[in-house]
Protein backbone atom coordinates (compact mmCIF):
# COMPACT_ATOMS: atom_id res chain seq x y z
CA UNK A 1 0.00 0.00 0.00
CA UNK A 2 1.26 3.45 -0.91
CA UNK A 3 1.04 5.84 2.03
CA UNK A 4 -0.61 9.12 1.17
CA UNK A 5 -1.02 11.35 4.19
CA UNK A 6 -2.19 11.28 7.73
CA UNK A 7 -5.02 13.52 8.83
CA UNK A 8 -4.45 15.98 11.60
CA UNK A 9 -7.63 15.37 13.58
CA UNK A 10 -7.45 18.71 15.36
CA UNK A 11 -7.23 20.75 12.17
CA UNK A 12 -8.88 18.32 9.75
CA UNK A 13 -6.01 18.78 7.28
CA UNK A 14 -3.74 16.23 5.67
CA UNK A 15 -0.02 16.38 6.34
CA UNK A 16 2.72 14.51 4.52
CA UNK A 17 3.74 11.14 5.88
CA UNK A 18 7.45 10.51 6.44
CA UNK A 19 8.77 6.97 6.23
CA UNK A 20 12.29 6.21 7.48
CA UNK A 21 14.48 3.34 6.31
CA UNK A 22 17.89 2.34 7.63
CA UNK A 23 20.89 0.56 6.17
CA UNK A 24 23.73 1.60 8.49
CA UNK A 25 25.58 3.83 8.20
CA UNK A 26 22.95 5.44 5.92
CA UNK A 27 19.26 6.16 6.23
CA UNK A 28 16.64 7.59 3.91
CA UNK A 29 13.46 9.48 4.73
CA UNK A 30 10.67 9.24 2.18
CA UNK A 31 8.24 12.17 2.20
CA UNK A 32 4.85 10.90 0.98
CA UNK A 33 2.08 13.19 -0.16
CA UNK A 34 -1.07 12.06 -1.98
CA UNK A 35 0.43 8.68 -2.86
CA UNK A 36 3.63 10.13 -4.33
CA UNK A 37 7.11 10.59 -2.90
CA UNK A 38 7.76 14.33 -2.98
CA UNK A 39 11.27 14.12 -1.52
CA UNK A 40 13.87 11.69 -0.23
CA UNK A 41 16.40 12.81 2.36
CA UNK A 42 19.68 10.98 2.94
CA UNK A 43 21.30 11.07 6.37
CA UNK A 44 23.42 9.06 8.79
CA UNK A 45 21.46 6.17 10.28
CA UNK A 46 22.39 7.24 13.82
CA UNK A 47 20.16 10.29 13.39
CA UNK A 48 16.88 8.46 12.69
CA UNK A 49 14.94 5.39 13.74
CA UNK A 50 13.42 3.15 11.07
CA UNK A 51 9.65 3.25 10.73
CA UNK A 52 8.04 0.23 12.41
CA UNK A 53 6.17 -0.71 9.23
CA UNK A 54 7.45 -0.02 5.74
CA UNK A 55 5.37 0.43 2.62
CA UNK A 56 6.06 -1.90 -0.31
CA UNK A 57 8.08 0.89 -1.91
CA UNK A 58 9.94 1.56 1.34
CA UNK A 59 10.82 -2.14 1.61
CA UNK A 60 12.06 -2.24 -1.98
CA UNK A 61 14.11 0.91 -1.43
CA UNK A 62 15.56 -0.55 1.78
CA UNK A 63 16.67 -3.69 -0.11
CA UNK A 64 18.38 -1.48 -2.70
CA UNK A 65 19.99 0.69 -0.01
CA UNK A 66 21.30 -2.43 1.75
CA UNK A 67 22.86 -3.55 -1.56
CA UNK A 68 24.36 -0.08 -2.04
CA UNK A 69 25.89 -0.07 1.47
CA UNK A 70 27.27 -3.59 0.84
CA UNK A 71 29.10 -2.25 -2.22
CA UNK A 72 26.83 -3.95 -4.72
CA UNK A 73 24.87 -2.39 -7.59
CA UNK A 74 21.75 -1.12 -5.84
CA UNK A 75 19.23 -1.45 -8.71
CA UNK A 76 17.03 1.32 -7.39
CA UNK A 77 13.35 0.37 -7.64
CA UNK A 78 10.82 2.26 -9.72
CA UNK A 79 9.14 4.56 -7.24
CA UNK A 80 6.17 6.92 -7.53
CA UNK A 81 8.28 10.07 -7.46
CA UNK A 82 6.56 13.44 -7.72
CA UNK A 83 8.34 15.64 -10.25
CA UNK A 84 5.47 18.14 -10.54
CA UNK A 85 7.30 20.94 -8.70
CA UNK A 86 10.27 20.80 -11.12
CA UNK A 87 10.74 23.03 -14.14
CA UNK A 88 11.50 21.38 -17.51
CA UNK A 89 15.16 22.45 -17.10
CA UNK A 90 15.39 20.92 -13.61
CA UNK A 91 13.84 17.69 -14.87
CA UNK A 92 16.24 17.56 -17.86
CA UNK A 93 19.21 18.02 -15.52
CA UNK A 94 18.01 15.26 -13.20
CA UNK A 95 17.39 12.94 -16.17
CA UNK A 96 20.95 13.57 -17.38
CA UNK A 97 22.24 13.14 -13.82
CA UNK A 98 20.60 9.71 -13.61
CA UNK A 99 22.95 8.58 -16.40
CA UNK A 100 26.10 9.35 -14.36
CA UNK A 101 27.21 5.85 -13.47
CA UNK A 102 28.24 4.52 -10.08
CA UNK A 103 31.95 5.18 -9.50
CA UNK A 104 32.15 8.02 -12.03
CA UNK A 105 32.10 11.78 -11.73
CA UNK A 106 30.96 14.69 -13.83
CA UNK A 107 31.26 18.43 -13.39
CA UNK A 108 28.54 21.04 -13.21
CA UNK A 109 29.73 22.41 -16.55
CA UNK A 110 29.75 18.99 -18.23
CA UNK A 111 26.24 18.33 -16.98
CA UNK A 112 25.12 21.76 -18.22
CA UNK A 113 26.56 21.02 -21.68
CA UNK A 114 24.81 17.64 -21.69
CA UNK A 115 21.43 19.33 -21.33
CA UNK A 116 22.22 21.93 -23.99
CA UNK A 117 23.20 24.79 -21.68
CA UNK A 118 26.94 25.29 -22.09
CA UNK A 119 27.99 27.92 -19.58
CA UNK A 120 25.10 26.94 -17.31
CA UNK A 121 27.20 25.40 -14.54
CA UNK A 122 25.72 27.68 -11.86
CA UNK A 123 22.18 26.87 -12.95
CA UNK A 124 23.01 23.16 -12.73
CA UNK A 125 24.50 23.79 -9.28
CA UNK A 126 21.17 25.31 -8.26
CA UNK A 127 19.34 22.20 -9.46
CA UNK A 128 21.75 19.99 -7.52
CA UNK A 129 21.13 22.05 -4.39
CA UNK A 130 17.38 21.49 -4.72
CA UNK A 131 17.53 17.84 -5.88
CA UNK A 132 14.51 16.24 -4.18
CA UNK A 133 15.83 12.69 -4.66
CA UNK A 134 19.54 12.52 -3.76
CA UNK A 135 21.24 9.13 -4.10
CA UNK A 136 18.62 8.00 -6.63
CA UNK A 137 19.54 11.05 -8.71
CA UNK A 138 23.22 11.08 -7.67
CA UNK A 139 24.08 14.75 -7.20
CA UNK A 140 27.01 13.65 -5.03
CA UNK A 141 28.76 12.58 -8.27
CA UNK A 142 28.90 16.19 -9.50
CA UNK A 143 32.06 18.14 -8.67
CA UNK A 144 33.63 21.46 -9.54
CA UNK A 145 35.54 21.93 -12.79
CA UNK A 146 38.83 21.44 -10.95
CA UNK A 147 37.57 18.26 -9.27
CA UNK A 148 36.89 20.00 -5.97
CA UNK A 149 34.04 18.88 -3.77
CA UNK A 150 31.60 21.74 -3.75
CA UNK A 151 28.30 22.01 -1.92
CA UNK A 152 26.05 19.13 -0.94
CA UNK A 153 22.64 20.07 0.41
CA UNK A 154 21.82 16.72 2.02
CA UNK A 155 22.16 16.20 5.76
CA UNK A 156 25.84 15.75 6.51
CA UNK A 157 26.93 18.18 3.79
CA UNK A 158 30.37 17.69 2.28
CA UNK A 159 31.23 14.95 4.79
CA UNK A 160 28.32 12.88 3.43
CA UNK A 161 29.29 13.68 -0.19
CA UNK A 162 32.89 12.58 0.45
CA UNK A 163 31.67 9.38 2.14
CA UNK A 164 29.39 8.49 -0.79
CA UNK A 165 32.13 9.14 -3.35
CA UNK A 166 34.68 7.11 -1.38
CA UNK A 167 32.14 4.31 -0.96
CA UNK A 168 31.56 4.24 -4.73
CA UNK A 169 35.23 4.50 -5.62
CA UNK A 170 34.78 8.03 -6.94
CA UNK A 171 37.19 9.54 -4.40
CA UNK A 172 40.09 8.11 -6.41
CA UNK A 173 38.75 9.88 -9.46
CA UNK A 174 38.91 13.21 -7.62
CA UNK A 175 42.67 12.82 -7.35
CA UNK A 176 42.91 12.10 -11.07
CA UNK A 177 40.48 14.79 -12.26
CA UNK A 178 42.42 17.13 -14.50
CA UNK A 179 41.41 20.76 -14.51
CA UNK A 180 39.96 21.72 -17.87
CA UNK A 181 42.36 23.14 -20.42
CA UNK A 182 41.63 26.83 -20.69
CA UNK A 183 41.32 28.05 -24.22
CA UNK A 184 42.89 31.45 -24.86
CA UNK A 185 40.38 34.24 -25.23
CA UNK A 186 40.53 37.28 -27.50
CA UNK A 187 41.55 39.27 -24.42
CA UNK A 188 44.64 37.03 -24.02
CA UNK A 189 45.72 37.79 -27.59
CA UNK A 190 45.12 41.53 -27.23
CA UNK A 191 47.09 41.84 -23.97
CA UNK A 192 50.09 39.95 -25.41
CA UNK A 193 50.60 42.49 -28.20
Image (tube, helix red, strand yellow):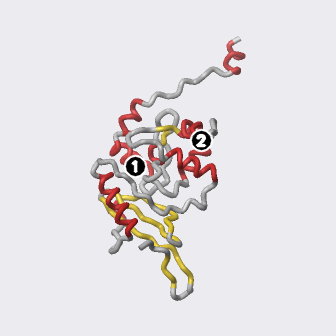
Image quarter in which the N terminus is found: bottom left
State the residue at coordinates (46%, 55%): 154
Find numbered disc 2 in the image and state the secondary structure of the residue it sits on. loop
Q: How many marks?
A: 2
Which one is earlier in the sequence, the residue at label 2 or at label 1? 2
Q: Circle 1 sits on which residue? A: 159
Q: Residue furthest left?
A: 70
Pointer 2: residues within 10 angstroms few (<14), some, or many (20+)? some
Location of the C terminus by quadrant is top right
Which residue is painted at 42% across and 48% down in the image?
161
Q: Is residue 136 above or below residue 110?
A: below
Q: Residue at x 48, y 42 (%)?
A: 142
- Residue 29 x %, y %: 42, 64
Instruction: Kindly indicate whether the residue at mark 1 contacts the one at mark 2 (C-beta within 8 angstroms).
Output: no
In the picture, measured across the screen, residue 129 lies left or right of residue 64, that is right
Query: Considering only vertical position in the picture, is 75 above or below 105?
Result: below
Q: Position of residue 185 (x, y in %)?
A: 67, 22
Q: Within 10 Å of the Cα at label 1, are there few (<14), some (14-19), or many (20+) other Cα atoms?
A: few
Pick the residue in front: 5 or 57.
57
Q: Is residue 44 left or right of residue 81?
A: left
Q: Nearer the viewer, mark 2 or mark 1?
A: 2
The picture places residue 15, in percent across and down from the top left corner, at 52, 76
Q: Which mark is residue 171?
A: none
Residue 28 pos. (x, y %): 39, 61
Q: Quadrant of residue 30?
A: bottom left
Kindly identify which residue carries mark 2. Answer: 115
* Front residue (pair 158, 18): 18
136 w.r.t. 111: above or below: below
Amino acid sequence: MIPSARTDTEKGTASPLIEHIEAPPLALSLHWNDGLISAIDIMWSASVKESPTLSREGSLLKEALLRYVAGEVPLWPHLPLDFSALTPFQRAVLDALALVRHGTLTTYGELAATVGSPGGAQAVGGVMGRNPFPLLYPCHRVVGSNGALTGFSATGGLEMKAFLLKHEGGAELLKKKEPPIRQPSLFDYITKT
